[in-house]
Image (spheres, helix red, strand yellow):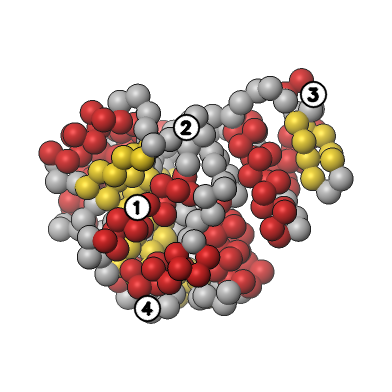
Amino acid sequence: MVTVCTPTRADHLRSQRRALDAHLPGARHVVVLPERPGSEELAAELLADGADPLELPAGPDLPVARCRNAGGDRAVETGAELIIFLDVDCMPGPDLGSRYADLPPDTVGMGPVTYLPESVGAPDPAELAGLTDPHPARPFPEHGLQRLEAGEFGMFWSLSFALHAALWTRLRREFGGFDEHYTGYGAEDTDFGRRLLYRRIPVVLVAGAHAYHRWHPVSSPPVEHLQDLLRNGAHYAERWGEWPAPGWFEEFERRGLVRRDGDGWIAAPAHRNSSGGG
């Protein structure tokens, strides 16, 4: 089990750990902590609680791709056979571990995620199954596995996915895992999914591997991450010949935050010196 965390989500992390204790007892929990105020104290708390905190140097832009790579590598080093990646906001459901454990050895699997409303707060792990309402943008099968086609790379998400350790080692050897040129928010998971499917590595939707995403404030489109999205979008376009999340950029353009530059976008003059959140 690997979690990418920031200290600002410490409360969500504690919810995740309660659900792990209830639904995956005995799982080793690697928590990747990029350097931020409070990260040393949180690492000490995690270590005392039996987790495996991994602290990483980090600049102002959250190095999500590097964190995921480091967490996966740490899981392999400590003898994991199955690696489950969960964002810190996600609590594992009662069947998440068993459904992921049935993945074929050469396959990457994703489970459905329910976005919990603000009113739910920090639910008891025993309540999670009754809150199941998966995100409708990604229709999952009722039973078994459903393989994604080559053009469905946009379906990949990194909130909750799993693979066997041997496959993770192979991906790191063949193309490095997550591309660490992506920093801050956006595109690193779409790029990862696209590279998997480009190499004909099976990616499947896993019925019943439910995770539950705790509420936190968001904006749509995520204007607070504009600079990250422009930087990462340009890197993605250089590789794939098109920009990710074009709908977001079209809305940014409508709001006067970006303007067209050839086939892509750049910040509008008034926003070139603004910085996105990490």
Q: Is residue 146 left or right of residue 56?
A: right
Residue 105 appears at what percent x and percent y? 37, 78
Residue that numbered label 3 is attached to = 269
Q: Residues within 10 Å of mark 1 (few under 14, many from 20)?
A: many
Residue 101 appears at what percent x and percent y? 30, 71
Residue at the spot 54% in from the left edge and 42% down from the top edge = 183
Q: CA distance from mark 3 to mark 2?
A: 25 Å
Q: Residue furthest right?
A: 262
Q: CA distance from mark 4 to mark 3?
A: 50 Å
Q: CA distance from mark 4 to mark 2?
A: 36 Å
Residue 41 appears at what percent x and percent y? 23, 28
Q: Residues within 10 Å of mark 4 (few under 14, many from 20)?
A: few
Residue that numbered label 2 is attached to = 59
Q: Give the mark toward the camera: 3 or 2.
A: 2
Quadrant of res 129: bottom left
Q: Are marks 3 and 2 in contact (CB under 8 Å)?
A: no
Q: Circle 3 — which element?
A: helix
Task: Tell me which numbered mark, 4 or 3, is placed earlier along the sequence.
Answer: 4
Task: Tell me which numbered mark, 1 or 3, is placed earlier along the sequence.
Answer: 1
What mark, if any, has residue 105 been given in the picture? 4
| Above or below 175: residue 16 | above
Q: Is residue 175 left or right of residue 125?
A: right
